[in-house]
Amino acid sequence: MRTLLTLGSVLLAVVATVAAGPVTPSPVAPGRAAPADTSVPLPERMADTGGGSQLITAEAPNTGATTGRVTWWDRRGGRWVAAGSADARFGAGGLVGGTERVQGTSTTPTGLYDLPYAFGIRPAPAGTRFAYRPVTDRSWWCQDNDSRAYNRWVEGLPADCRAAEAEHLTEYGAQYAHALVIGFNYDRPVRGRGAAIFLHVNGKGATAGCVSVPAGAMRRILAWADPARSPHIAVGTASGRTAITNY
């Protein structure tokens, strides 16, 4: 997982998925992004795209927004080319820097993250190459800060993970028809920072911190994403501002 705080050398690049354009000698006021050159594909304005040849960007207009745009990109011939795009939804609490997020705030964490695997209540869409876990009646995602299974999928709820502090995945119906796990707080989870952050199918409105897209877009993303090409997701704002100030 890569968060904004660990990308200090990136400066404004992943602070917002549409942060400043290429570095120029012109000074920029502290805490503000330089004007974005929208003639240049978004990933080419980022100093770090995860090192692979596929990238998903999830862009909100500002940190208080609950809607925005998801675009998925391919690196071809030395340039980034958009493979698809869809309207997106974010957390009901807006967006916040990944290293400053607090569990239970319904905020979507900004940053650059890997995508460990896919899952779903429905079978994997045709062409899916990601490891895909089918949701069963015994599938839970533990969010109990006192559990050894914190921020992990479990088949059968462990004794140290309270049901009230876990998601029973089948109960989310169409939202989890298909999903990708976002590697936020995943490799070395920090208790209290948050769990169960996914890219999944839209529900009725804003999310509890995930990024969501229409069902058809989610199927297209899964058919497009190739783990051999190391896809990542970058989440941020068009303004270049996030709650992170110490990057």
Image (spheres, rainbow, N blue to C red):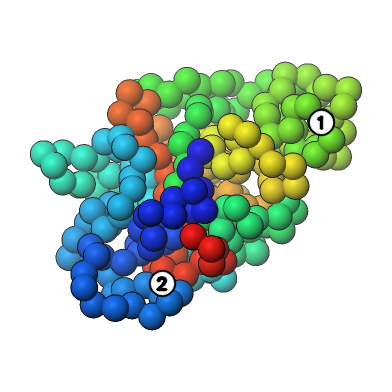
Which element carries disc 1, helix, strand or loop?
loop
> What is the quadrant of residue 122 in the picture?
top right
Establish if 180 lies above or below 36. Answer: above
> What is the quadrant of residue 163 in the picture?
top right
Establish if 37 lies above or below 222. Answer: below
Residue at coordinates 20% horizontally, 47% vertically from top-left? 81
Residue at coordinates 44% horizontally, 55% vertically from top-left? 8
Q: Residue 199 versus residue 104: which sits nearer the camera? A: 104
Which element carries disc 2, helix, strand or loop?
loop
> What is the quadrant of residue 27 in the picture?
bottom left
Whether residue 134 is visible here, answered yes or no, is: yes
- Across and down, in percent, residue 109 comes to 57, 53
- Across and down, in percent, residue 206 comes to 60, 59
Q: Is residue 50 left or right of residue 105?
A: left
Local crowd at mark 2 within 10 Å, few (<14), some, or many (≥20)? Answer: many
In the current view of this chain or complex, which residue is farthest to the left? 77
Marking on residue 33: none
- Across and down, in percent, residue 205 comes to 61, 58
Report the amino acid beneath label 2. Answer: Ser
Whether residue 220 is visible here, answered yes or no, is: no
- Across and down, in percent, residue 149 comes to 75, 27
Residue at coordinates 78% horizontally, 19% vertically from top-left? 156
Residue at coordinates 69% horizontally, 48% vertically from top-left? 193
The Cα atoms of the two marked residues, 1 and 2, are separated by 38 Å
Q: Is residue 97 left or right of residue 125?
A: right
Q: Which residue is mark 1?
A: 147
Q: Which residue is mark 2?
A: 239
Q: Number of numbered discs present?
A: 2
